[in-house]
Amino acid sequence: MPRSRMHVLFLAPDTHVYNHHFVQGLKSVGVRVSALGLAPRERTAPELLRHLDGYASCPRMLEPDALLTALSQLGQRTFDRVETIDEPLVEPAALLRERLQLPGLSVATARLCRDKVAMKAFLRERGVPCAQSTRAATPTDVHAFAEQHGYPLILKPVAGYGSLQTFRVDDRGQLDRALQQLPPSAKAPIAVEEFVDGHEGFFDTITDGGGVRCDFAAHYFPNCLEAARDRTVAPQIAVTNRIDQDGYRELRALGRRVVDALGIRNTATHMEWFFGSKGLKFSEIGARPAGEKIWDMYRFANDFDVYREWALALLDRPAERAPSRRQAVGSVQIRPDRDGRFVGHDGVDEAWRRCRPFVYEYELPAVGDATKPLEKGWLVNTWFRLRHADYDELRELMTFLGRTVKSRAR
């Protein structure tokens, strides 16, 4: 089939405006794109629909049978690929791919990328350094793991993502309280892991049929779990432009080793890692792009249409450009002092005097706007995104913003 006639089915194109960029990336390389989404057509963003060759709604997106049924709304069409960037849909997309006999991420790999316990066991068997972990269906299972491995421990859903519903427990009392909030069961077991100390970051890739095509590295300040629990923290994400230097050689080798061991091909990946007293440790990997509009940060840092390059890699076409590494890019969030409605910001004028030339995007909620809870992520309430050719200067600017700007609510 000629390239211009390839047809991609995209699942959930409108859960966030971020998703639109991936659809546009596919369209930019000359393929047709149809989509299945949660909302009916009349409640789907018009700016998205302009880029689609077909659209149908499917309220039960997690069910492969429902996805197959919804395809009939698109008429007698054939597809060459099935893709999504939404974490919960990675496995349903793979199952649909299998039913339609299409290339792409396999069901086996998708399941490993969704199941943190199976993923870690699989990688430990292949020599990848990662925390000890288990699947627990009862509190007794959790306590047995604690007796064997000691504290601290991490508890989280087996197939969750981000830091939502993630608990660090340092003793039996904290463990029992966490189990009340995240109770394990046979139908919904939880992941229990050895706590790994150290600095936390992520390593993202675009893969083609041969493996990693290009990569990016970034850091969290502070680590995600601390940031998610303390509203006085102004959390930072810092994308380095020094990834080609020797200090990242071990991380890049680990990332490629994980991608190859899992057989991840023709997709994006988002891998979390720790570096501490036990050295470099793999944490987990998703077979999808990072959230929080992080790929926009890669775009601004690298003079690089990351969405188009993703589409080219997905289709196994040659890359057009490589990341320039010209800029380091960062994101810093200022949390309101309480939940409620915004009553104002302090320190903004001072912040602008020093930082304005480097800020390329920001949000300052208006007085009266409702605050959003911390668990909604790093790109809500008050935030700034910056770029600078020097990574250390970028970090200083973000730290200055976090100390200077204060967000007040009542």
Image (cartoon, rainbow, N blue to C red):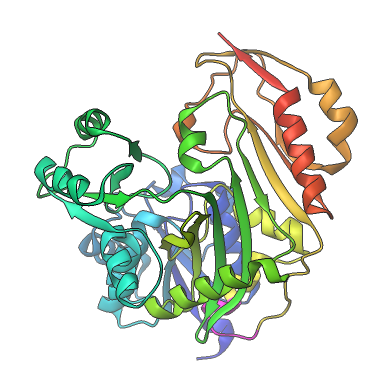
Residue 289 lies, in percent from the top left, at 51, 60
Return the residue nearer the eye: 50 or 144: 144
Q: Locate residue 39 relative to residue 181 in the image: left or right.
A: right
Q: Which residues are magenta?
A: 312-318
Q: Residue furthest bottom?
A: 1
Q: Residue at x 57, y 55 (%)?
A: 20
Residue 255 lies, in percent from the top left, at 51, 71
Figure quadrant of residue 205: bottom right
Residue 326 lies, in percent from the top left, at 81, 63
238 w.r.t. 259: above or below: above
Q: Residue at x 63, y 64 (%)?
A: 216
Figure quadrant of residue 176: top left
Asked if one can make out residue 167 in the rendered structure from this viewpoint, the answer is yes
Return the residue nearer the eye: 298 or 37: 298
Q: Residue furthest top?
A: 410
Q: Locate residue 315 relative to residue 139 in the image: left or right.
A: right
Residue 133 lies, in percent from the top left, at 27, 57
Q: Residue at x 56, y 48 (%)?
A: 17
